[in-house]
Amino acid sequence: MNYRLIARYLRFVLQLQAVFLLPMLAYSVTQGEHGAGKGFLITLVIVVILSLLLRLVKFDPEKTMYIKDGFVMVAICWIAVSVMGAFPYWISGDIPFFLDALFESVSGFTTTGATILTNVEGLSSGLLLWRGFSHWIGGMGVLVFLLALVPALSGGERSFNVMKAESTGPAPGKLVPKLRQSAKLLYIIYLVLTLILVLFLLAGGMPLLDSVVNAMSTAGTGGFSARNISIEAYNSAYLEMVIAVFLIIFGISFNMYYFLVARNFSAVYKNEELRVYLGIILVSTILVAVNLLGSVCDNAADALRYAFFQVSSTITTTCLSSTNYDLWPTFSRFALITLTFIGASAGSTGGGIKVSRIIILFKESRRILFRMVHPRSVETVKMDGKTLDKTVVHSVSAYLALLMMILVVSTFVVAWDGYDLESTFTAVSSCLNNNGPGLGLAGPAGNFSSFSPLSKVVLSLNMLIGRLEIYPVLLMFSPRTWKRI
Amino acid sequence: MDIVIVGDGKVGYTLAEQLNKEGHDITIIDNRADILNSTLEMLDVMGVRGNGASMEVQMEAGVPSADLLIAATSGDEVNMLCCLTAKMLGAKRTIARVRNPEYSTQLQMLKEPLGLSMVINPELESAREIARVVKFPPALKIETFSKGRVELIEFKLLEHMPIVGKSLMEMPQIIDSNVLICAVDRGGAVIIPRGSFVLEAGDRIHITGAARQITSFLSQIGGIHLKVRSLMLVGGGRIAYYLAKMLDVKAFRIKIIEKNRERCDELCDLLPNATIIHGDGSDIDVLESEGIEEADAFVALTNIDEENLIMSMVANEKKVPKIITKTGRFDNLSILEKLGIDTVINPKMTTANHIIQYVRAVQNSVHFNNIKTLYKIVNGKAEATEFTATSDTAHLNVRLDQLHLKRNLLLAVIVRDGKVIIPHGEDVIKEGDSVIVLTNEHKLSCLNNIFEGS
C-alpha cells in the first residue's frame, strides 16, 4: 500500500475542505450566528493543523499508484471529509451527539439526504448552507474537484484510477483525453446548470437561502431541504415542476451535455441509457398517477403533479418530497422503492444501481436464457451498438450480488432495533442507494434519529458504500489490501 | 495538439507516453479491450475501442478535428487505409508505419494520393542506426543534426585514453582537433560540462563536430582501434535484410544465422552476397563453429529479447570487439550496461523518436518561428535545439567570449552556409546562421533565451 500517496491526497483534500469552510464561516459571522461560527472556526483550525501535520509525510513520486491504492485512497479521503464535515454540526451544539452529526455529514456528502434532525428549521442558516453544499460537492465528487484544480495530481500517471473510483457507473470514461480538462469540464457543466436552477427557483418566489440550498440539493441529487416538510412547504406547482425537471437533468450522464455543447447530437440521440431512463420515468409517472387518482387524489392534474415530482425525485435518488408519499397506496410506494434501486444514469450525480447496469443485467439475463434454448449460439451483450467487454458484464453481475449481500447483512443489524420490517428494510435500502428517506419511521415525515448508534454507523457505511459504488469501501476493509505480498 | 494514435502496440504505447508527457491531447484506438484498458490505467489519454481504419471509429475518436493521426498497427495496409480515411475526414497530418520492404519503392508515389505527411519504417530506421555504428565502431550511438551535417557521437572513455583525468581546458594541449564535448553521462546523471570539468574513465561522453574532425579526435585519443570488416548477424528478419542491403558489398563480409529454413531460402534470393547459415543462433556451438571469435561485429537481431541478451553476453565473452543488441520490450539501459551490453538498438524507441521529432517540428513551426528543430538526446535527459539567427537576435556579430550565456547551456555548433563551425571565443553569430544549443535544464523558445538575464 502506498501510504505516502494516500497522505498526499488526504492533505490536498483537507486543504480543499478548509477552503470550503471559509465562506461558511464568513456567512455565519455576517448572520450573527455565534454557535455555527464557532463550529466552523474550530473545524477550520483542526483541518488546517491536520493538513500541516500531513505535510510531514514526504511524497515519493517514484512509487506508482496502483488501482488498489487509488480506490482505498478515495475511500479514506471520503471518510476524512465526512468526519471533518461533521464537526461544525457537533461543535456548534445544533446536533449534540457526534454520531448524529457524523450521520448527517455522511448523508450530506454521499448525497443521500437521510437526516436525524427532527426540526430542520431549527438549524442555523450557516449549517443549512453547509448541509446543502456537502450535497453539491459530494454529488460530482470531492476528488474530481481536486483533479480539476491541482495540476500536480491530475498530470501524473494512473491518476485516472481516482476518477474511476469516484465517478458513477460501470465503466466511467473521460470526456477529453486530459484528465484535468475532463474534470474541469464536468464541474463547469455542473456549476452552470446549478446557477440556472437557482435563477429559476428565485423566479418562483423562493427565498434566496432556500433557493441556494434546494438548488445544491437538487444538483447533487441529495435530498436535504431547507424545510422540515421539504418542497411541500412552498406549496407551489411551479417550483415543484422546476425541481422535478432539473432533477431529471442532473440524473442524466454529464457526457450528454458535453456532446450537446460539442454539437454531437447523434451521440445523444442514440444513447440507450438516456432513452431507457426517460422511458422508465414516463411509464412510472403514468402508472403512479393512475394509482393515485383512484385513491389519494381527486383530479388528474394533481395526481400527475405529485406522481411526476416523486418519480423524478426518487429515480434520481434525491427524495425531496412534495407530499407525504408514505400515505400513498401500496402499489405507488412499492414503485418508488423499486425506482430507488434502479437509480439514475451512469456518469450523473444520482445514486442507485444505475440504469446502464440494469440494461446490462437485463441483456445478459436474456442472453443466458437464449443460450439455454440454443446451446451453440454465440451472442454478445451490446450497448449503444457496441459490444461490451466481458469483464464489464461480469463486474455488473458481481456488483448486484455484492449489493444484495450488503443489503441483507445491514438489514439484519438494523432489524435488531426492533422496528417494523417496512421501516427497517427501506431505511437500509434508501441509505445504500443514496436515496434518503424510506418509508414508515424513516419516511418523509419521519427521520433517522430513533435508530440505535450501531444502526447509525451501519447506515452511514451503507451510504459511503453506495456513493463510491461498493468496491473502494470493501477494498479498504479487506485485510488482503493491506498486506505487502 | 490533438493527436490520434491507431494501434496500442509497443510503438503506439511509447508514442502515447512520450507525446502525453509533452502536453499533447492523445486519443488511442485499438480493438483489443484488455490492452486498451491497461494503457488507460497507465497514461492520461483517452481510448476508443474499434477498428481504427473505420470511419465511424475515427469520428468517435475525433479524427476530423485532429492535428495528427499516427497509424501504428501491425498491418501496413491497415495503416495506409487509416491515413487515407483520416485525411478524407479532415485530419491535418497523417503518419503511417509501413514496414514491408516490397512497398518501399512505391511509397514515394503513394505518399501524395494517400495524403501521408510521413512514412516510417521501424526496421529500416533501426538498420540505418546499426549501419552508422558499424561504419564508425567507437561510437555507442550516433545522432545527426542539421540535415546530417552535424553528428553527435556517444562513446565511453577508457582508462588508457590520454584525456582521462584532464579538464576540458587542458584538452587543446594534448590533442589537436576541433571537436566539442557537449554532454557527459556519468552514472546516469547528465552534465553539460564547463571548462573546468575533469573527465573520468567510464564517462559516456557526447562529442560533436564535423565528421572528419571527430575521426581525428578519436584516433588521437586511441579510440579507434578497429574497423569492422566482418559481421555476424543472428536473426534474419527485416532489420538484417535492410542492414545487409545497406552495407557495401566490397567493404563488409556478412554472415546471417537464421533458424527458419524457408526464410533462409528467401534471404539467399534477396541477398546474393551474404552468407546465409541455417541454424539456431542461441546455440553456442553454432556460433562457435561459424567463427564468432573472428567476427569484428556481432549483431543480435532475433525477436526474443532474452536470446539477444544471452547471445550478446556470449559474444562479449568471446571478445568480439563490437556488439550490437536489439531489444524489443526491454529498455532499461543502465541494467544492460552492467551486463556489458552498451550498444542497444530499440526499434520502438527509434520509431517513436522519429515521430516525436516530427511532431515537435510541426508544433514549433506553428508556435515559435525561429526554432528549426528540437532533439532529445542522451536518452531524453538533455535537449538540443536548432535556431535560426534573425535580425531580431541580440548580440549579433559580437565575439562569443564577450557574451554571458546561461549556466548548464552550451552553444554547440554554428552552421553557416553549409559549413560546420565549432564555436570558440573569437567566433560570432551572424544573421542567417543555424545555431545548435544544448541544455539539460532550460526551456528555450527563442535564441535570445540563451543569454544571461533574458
Image (cartoon, coloured by chain):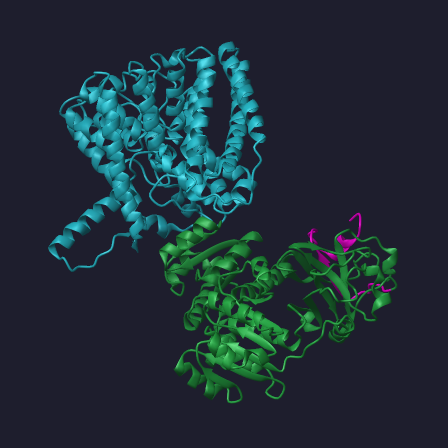
At a point 57% along the width and 26% down the height, the residue shown is A53
Between A388 and B346, the one lying in front of the other is B346
The reply to whether residue B236 is in sight is no
Q: Position of residue A420 (x, y in %)?
A: 19, 18
Q: Is residue A394 above or below residue A436?
A: below
Q: Is residue B432 magenta?
A: yes
Quarter of the figure with the N terminus of chain A: top left
In the image, farthest residue toward the left: A373
At a point 44% along the width and 43% down the height, the residue shown is A161
Between A389 and B55, the one lying in front of the other is A389
Between A402 and B431, the one lying in front of the other is A402
Left or right relative to A461: residue B252:
right
Q: Position of residue B395 (x, y in %)?
A: 84, 57
Q: Position of residue B396 (x, y in %)?
A: 84, 60
In the rendered structure, which segment of residues is drawn in magenta?
Answer: B427-454
At a point 51% along the width and 59% down the height, the residue shown is B14
The reply to whether residue A433 is in sight is yes
Chain letter for cyan, please. Answer: A
Q: Chain B appears in which tint?
A: green
Q: Is residue B448 magenta?
A: yes
